[in-house]
Amino acid sequence: MINVIGLGYIGFPTALMLASHGISVIGTDYNKELVNTLQTGHTTFKEKGLDELFNAALKNGIRFSTEYQTTDTYIVSVPTPYDKFSKKVDPAYVIGAVKDVLKICPVGATIVIESTISPGTINKHIRPVIEETGFKIGRDIHLVHAPERIIPGNMVYELLHNNRTIGADEKEIGERVKEIYASFCQGEIIVTDIFTAEMTKVVENTFRAVNIAFANELAKICRHDNIDVYEIIRICNMHPRVNILQPGPGVGGHCISVDPWFLVGDYPSLAKVIDESMKTNDAMPAFVLHRIHDIMRENKMRDLSRVGLYGLTYKENVDDMRESPTLQLLEDQESHLGVPLKVYDPLIEKDVVANQYHNLEKFLNDIDFVVIMVGHDEIKNNNDKLNGKIVLDTRNIIEGLNVYKL
Ligand code: SAJ
């Protein structure tokens, strides 16, 4: 039996995947409300294919509890926030989960850490915790790091198809854990050491952050001379060895906007390109705010209350707002001007900010200038509703008269 600890964006779908492929699973989370919701057969976030997967896992007997279970294998997928000042990972939840596992696990148990951690976290923070309890690593407790790679919006497909990395101290343990993941994962599974596995995870997200920063910088350069960045990127990408990403209003989510900072925090005198890239991405919401003011001036528009932001989530077609560029923009805007802009997102049902709308028509009725911050399908499929409005399309999804770009 596998005890999956932490039933959030990663732990929950992973637990379901294992259970639906015939492995006995109990999911544990200290959040009672969350566990109650799952016990009544409801999910806590939306994802393509998640409900079907949940049903398959329930049929196979998956259970949920607030209690840690006594078993031979644990998968820890608790959050790893980062400290905004030191830029370092905050491993407190992982340490807490490992300590709790150690209280009840039998000798010989394997602890797999799935949470994203900065390179060296297991050496620095996890090994000492295990050794303090008198357990010997490699004899009494086996340690593994199996970082995930799934993308919000396509989690179920990617869990099944992505290649994976397993880092272990001992080859046989690595191979045993590989077998567990191979129960559902059709991709290639590489077994390596723990430090390498930690590093690969952070490097993958850093690669993407740096490349998005490059696209964002190009957008600023092209704006300076009023040339079309998207046309430049399209033409450059016809070169066989060039593949430039898309500029946008900023980088959100809990991965690409966070993980690269771990490298900056841990290697401050070495991670220079990464540091500048992260600053470039973080400055994009402020750049959008400047664009809003320039466009207002150009259109002789003065009333900020007639400006609305479309989209609150960090990217299209997900209901996740973590580190969202819209929230960052609102924060910048309110601290300078005090007038909150109007906001609407079809995927956010709760009221999370001031002046939030829950109906596209009403939202559009109350504004003259729409800033598209997120390219949800809803607006792609209804772009005729924007006729007559001034539009700033930061995602390059809409063509037409009066449509401004980044
Ligand atoms: N973005 C751009 N321009 C682009 C691509 C993305 O501005 O060309 C923005 C998005 O709008 C979003 C942010 O970047 O705000 C990040 O979105 P994303 O879709 O690129 O990635 P995430 O954060 O949803 O998921 C990433 C993935 N990592 C990589 O692609 C290397 C995923 O595979 C990881 O599992 C996930 O991080 C994670 O958990 O680490």
Image (spheres, rainbow, N blue to C red):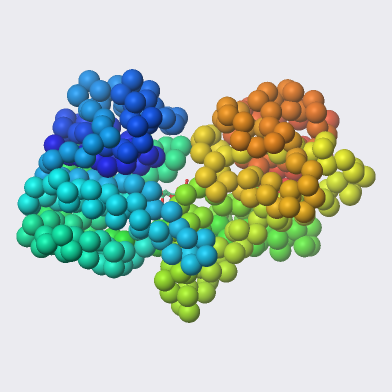
Instruction: Write the residue at 25% across / 55% down.
Output: 145
The answer to whether 402 appears left or right of 309 in the picture is right
Give the image quarter of residue 140: bottom left
Quadrant housing the N terminus: top left
Q: Residue furthest right?
A: 300
Q: Residue furthest bottom?
A: 269
User: Residue 186's x, y, as percent?
Assistant: 25, 41
User: Residue 351's x, y, as percent?
Assistant: 62, 31
User: Residue 338's x, y, as percent?
Assistant: 78, 47
- Closer to the camera in the image, 39 or 32: 32
User: Residue 121's x, y, as percent?
Assistant: 31, 64
The answer to whether 403 appears left or right of 24 in the picture is right
Does residue 182 appear in this view? no
Instruction: Write the residue at 45% across / 30% down.
Output: 46
Is 182 drawn above or below residue 230 in the view shown?
above
Does residue 66 appear in this view? yes
Looking at the rendered structure, the number of numbered marks drawn on it comes to 0
Instruction: Write the residue at 31% across / 38% down.
Output: 29
Give the image quarter of residue 14: top left
Instruction: Write the residue at 52% across / 61% down.
Output: 84
- Closer to the camera in the image, 226 or 347: 347
Is 120 drawn above or below residue 250 in the view shown?
below
- Closer to the camera in the image, 306 or 134: 134
The answer to whether 153 appears left or right of 360 in the picture is left
